[in-house]
Amino acid sequence: MNEELFIQLLKEKRIEINDKQLKQFEIYYSTLVEWNEKMNLTAITAKNEVYLKHFYDSLTPAFYFPFEGNMTVCDVGAGAGFPSLPLKIIFPELQVTIVDSLNKRITFLDHLAKQLNLQGVNFYHDRAETFGQNKKFRESFDIVTARAVARLSVLSELCLPLAKVGGTFLALKGPQFQEEEKDAQSAIHQLGGEWNEVHAFALPEEGSERHLAVVKKIKTTPKRYPRKPGIPNKSPIS
Ligand SMILES: C[S@@+](CC[C@H](N)C(=O)[O-])C[C@H]1O[C@@H](n2cnc3c(N)ncnc32)[C@H](O)[C@@H]1O
């Protein structure tokens, strides 16, 4: 996806992008590629592919969900910043918190945020299981996002404890979603969530399948969740 198509397709979704934001995406791309030579951040490095599979893909939640004003967003396992930093570029008032268990990714994000001159971003080196038990963060975010971190039953345990009651968990999922959905129903319910909607769509140009699962937090999450690091993955809530 070249820059012109990126601009045009976002415009079709009523997302206007100005020169400053375009420049920020350019800096994001060059910083990602530069740092990727020293540390493994992404397997995708061709410019057209980064614009499609990282930048555009990260913005797809905004096609279905209104990101308004200074909403607080926690991105669990954001790696090199996806999806929350492309969203932050487009919606600069968002207050973004990233938690990732790999410290080198946090080092990259600190550097990137300076290059992009981002305000209102905080990065934490932690496991989501521990972070979700921290009183300062638990049940405090308007939105919790995650892309490519774990299957939905596991991801729900990592993410839903961080969403405030009335908040939303947005899971960016690929073609495997339908299988994961069935397994995750009970976990979502036990964690205080409720299915809101699922949006199925295809990425432009190469047509790969995507799903955006929108889960509402309707009740407080029981204190025992999230369980200790590694347990959600080893024995998912069933
Ligand atoms: C495959 S990468 C995906 C990164 C990014 N979300 C994306 O879509 O490109 C998964 C990331 O999740 C992080 N991660 C995995 N399990 C985690 C956990 N329990 N707590 C925090 N971060 C975790 C990893 O360190 C890694 O950066």
Image: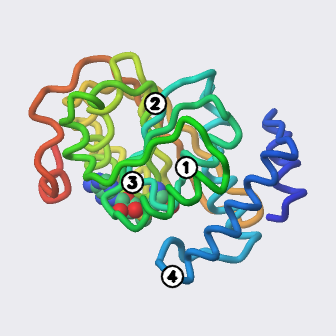
- Mark before the other along the chain sequence, 1 or 3: 3
Res 191 quadrant in image: top left
Q: CA distance from mark 4 to mark 1?
A: 22 Å
Report the residue at 82% width, 41% height from top. 17
Can you tell which mark lies on residue 77? 3
Mark 4 or 3, closer to the camera: 4
* Picture colour scheme: rainbow
**Which quarter of the rendering shows the N terminus?**
bottom right
Mark 4 residue CB less than 8 A from any atom of ligand 1: no
Amino acid type of disc 2?
Ile
Label 4, residues with CA under 10 Å away: few <14, some 14-19, many ≥20? few
Mark 4 or 2, closer to the camera: 4
> In front: 141, or 185?
141
According to the picture, the residue beneath numbered tag 1 turns out to be 83
- Mark before the other along the chain sequence, 1 or 2: 1
Mark 3 residue CB less than 8 A from any atom of ligand 1: yes
- Mark before the other along the chain sequence, 4 or 1: 4
